Image: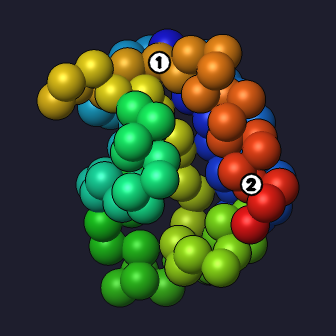
Amino acid sequence: MRVMVFYASGGYRCEEIENSLGALQNIVGGYIEPCAPVQLRRMGIELLANEEGLLKGLPPNQNLYPFFYVGNVVAVGTAGENFDELSDAQVDFLHKWVVEL
């Protein structure tokens, strides 16, 4: 599935990953925690971060400032209660959203 990864080390890009919990956990380096602002959720987008990122001392994710996230963050689409790949419109929205931050 197509997701957008915001790297703590800097930058972000779309990636194709397997649609599985393990693949998402691999990106964030641990258990995932949904943490998208309402603006993204209204667009059918969820952000997933490492649930224990602060406890593990992960570095701040500068891509998403002024929101405070640590470690890598992955953006996925939503289909009801399930995660889904991002649509072209959602990818375009995320690119604009990051630039406006």
Examine the rendered structure and indicate whether residue 51 appears above or below residue 7: below
Residue 72 sits in quarter:
bottom right
| Nearest to N terminus: mark 2 or mark 1 | 1
x, y (%) of residue 55?
35, 85
Depth order, front residue of 47/93: 93
Amino acid tagged 1:
Glu
Examine the rendered structure and indicate whether residue 74 appears above or below residue 11: above
Q: Residue at x 43, y 61 (%)?
A: 37
Depth order, front residue of 75/89: 89
Depth order, front residue of 14/54: 14
Q: Is residue 47 left or right of residue 69?
A: left
Q: Is residue 101 left or right of residue 20?
A: right
Task: Tell me the crowding category of disc 1: few under 14, some 14 to 19, or many 20 or more residues within 10 angstroms, Cα based.
Answer: many
Q: Is residue 19 left or right of residue 21?
A: right
Amino acid tagged 2:
Val
Residue 98 tag number: 2
Please identify, in this view, whether the residue under mark 2 or under mark 1 is nearer the observer: 2
Depth order, front residue of 73/22: 73
x, y (%) of residue 42?
39, 42
Q: Residue at x 30, y 66 (%)?
A: 51
Q: Residue at x 56, y 66 (%)?
A: 71
Is there any visible trace of residue 51 in the rendered image?
Answer: yes
Examine the rendered structure and indicate whether residue 98 appears above or below residue 87: below
Task: Tell me the crowding category of disc 2: few under 14, some 14 to 19, or many 20 or more residues within 10 angstroms, Cα based.
Answer: few
- Where disc 1 sits, the SS reads loop
The residue pinned by badge 1 equals 85
